[in-house]
Image (spheres, helix red, strand yellow):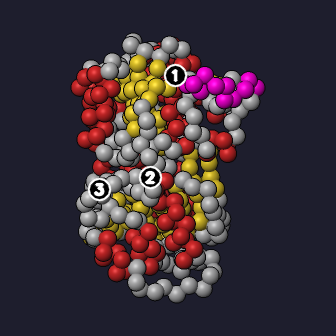
């Protein structure tokens, strides 16, 4: 990553953060009031290394947009959660002790630690990416990501020749199952004979395991690969095997090439700048946001036919306008059970608890859901704090 002039890196082990957390901070229960003339200190806690080119990379584009938009009014930093790191609670608490005004925690794995620390530091704002619990100083922000996987499924379903598509997933939790089902519904909308073979690897970011699983699926005859993972290694494996892929989290075609037919992407820039702008103005209020603003479909590859592009564009218009919904019936599970009746659509509550597989999903037993962090390792906990990045280079 290229940093702004004057930026500096501090490499801190978790134990150092724990020591910082022991320093008391005065708390009076009042809402955050930014002192005049002082920059708003904003920090992002990332689940993966910044170089993943996926989930964390997409969030960092939002952080950079904050710097570009607000200049000297803000000072941003970020913490990389390296593979094998331990419980993030103390690290998040240490950041609050250091006086950060706004703390973005960018993973499902950080929900409970964020809720806990937010109770202890009512003068700081906490923005949890995922979750459903709010407080006067705690917001939750997430996107209706089912739209983009559905649209990318249309592309994958039209592209497959073997009618076998591989899907490498992290955990059998509703967020992941929802994306898998949406993708499969898109595939089957254009190709009712196609199947989506899902494999769970029990991690959000495990490049070696992702590649090994991709090769297993390729050997089983799939000719399109996609994932709910944070790196581009699956796209690279597909390209090397001469097959197509669908990216996730970011526009992975820009990193790998035209064999990536499109990607379901997160775009946090507008939402993050909106939140920080309102905090600076003193008008921000706690929210539970779940909308389309932070999701999108990346531009399609030249390898995608004009007819498929037209179909995708038409469906995207219908979904964004509310004229269509991904999860409206009739919908059947892969065990031939009628899950959603004709004329009915799933509610948000039903989306958030989804634990059934759509017709067309073929898979092995899933990995257990994370009981804290989405990765396990015998390595010692390791966190990397990069502070402050200040402003973008001119």
- Residue 239 visible in the current orientation: yes
Residue 356 pos. (x, y %): 57, 34
Q: Real-space Cα distance between discs 3 and 1?
A: 34 Å
Binning the other alpha carbons within 10 Å of mark 3 as few (below 14), some (14 to 19) or many (20 upward) gives few
Disc number at residue 360? 1
Residue found at x 35% / y 20%: 222
Disc number at residue 377? 3
Which one is nearer the viewer's eye here, 229 or 285? Answer: 229
Of mark 2 and mark 1, the one earlier in the sequence is 1
Residue 179, above or below 134: above
| Left or right: where 156 falls relative to 82 | right
Residue found at x 30% / y 49%: 51
Residue 57, above or below 217: below
Q: Real-space Cα distance between discs 3 and 2?
A: 13 Å
Magenta run includes residue 341:
yes
**Which element carries disc 1, helix, strand or loop?**
loop
Of mark 3 and mark 1, the one earlier in the sequence is 1
Image quarter of residue 337: top right
Which stretch did the figure color magenta? 333-343
Residue 69 pos. (x, y %): 48, 58
């Amino acid at each position: 990553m290229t940093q702004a002039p004057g930026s500096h890196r501090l490499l801190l082990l978790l134990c150092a953060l724990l020591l910082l957390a022991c320093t008391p901070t005065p708390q009076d229960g009042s809402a955050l009031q930014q002192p005049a003339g002082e920059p708003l200190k904003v920090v992002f806690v990332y689940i993966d290394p910044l170089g993943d080119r996926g989930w964390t990379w997409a969030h960092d584009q939002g952080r950079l947009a904050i710097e570009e938009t607000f200049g000297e009014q803000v000072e941003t930093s970020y913490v990389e959660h390296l593979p094998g790191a331990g419980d993030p609670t103390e690290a998040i608490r240490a950041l609050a002790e250091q006086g950060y005004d706004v703390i973005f925690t960018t993973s499902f794995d950080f929900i409970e630690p964020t809720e806990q620390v937010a109770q202890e530091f009512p003068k700081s704002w906490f923005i949890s990416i995922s979750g459903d619990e709010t407080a006067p100083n705690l917001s939750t922000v997430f996107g209706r990501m089912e739209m983009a996987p559905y649209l990318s499924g249309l592309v994958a379903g039209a592209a497959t020749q073997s009618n076998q598509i591989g899907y490498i997933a992290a955990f059998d939790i509703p967020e992941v199952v929802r994306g898998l089902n949406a993708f499969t519904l898109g595939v089957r909308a254009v190709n009712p004979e196609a199947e989506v073979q899902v494999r769970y690897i029990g991690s959000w970011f495990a490049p070696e395991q992702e590649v090994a699983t991709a090769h297993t699926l390729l050997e089983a005859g799939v000719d399109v690969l996609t994932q709910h993972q944070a790196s581009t290694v699956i796209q690279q494996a597909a390209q090397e095997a001469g097959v197509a892929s669908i990216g996730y989290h970011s526009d992975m075609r820009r990193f790998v090439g035209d064999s990536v037919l499109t990607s379901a992407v997160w775009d946090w820039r507008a939402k993050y700048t909106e939140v920080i702008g309102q905090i600076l103005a003193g008008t921000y209020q706690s929210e539970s946001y779940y909308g389309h603003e932070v999701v999108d479909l990346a531009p399609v590859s030249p390898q995608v036919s004009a007819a498929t592009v037209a179909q995708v564009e038409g469906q995207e218009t219908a979904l964004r306008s509310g004229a269509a919904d991904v999860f409206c019936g009739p919908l059947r599970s892969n065990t031939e059970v009628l899950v959603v009746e004709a004329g009915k659509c799933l509610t948000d509550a039903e989306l958030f608890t989804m634990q059934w597989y759509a017709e067309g999903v073929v898979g092995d037993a899933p990995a257990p859901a994370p009981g804290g962090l989405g990765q396990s390792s015998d390595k010692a906990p390791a966190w990397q704090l990069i502070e402050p990045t200040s402003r973008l280079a001119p």
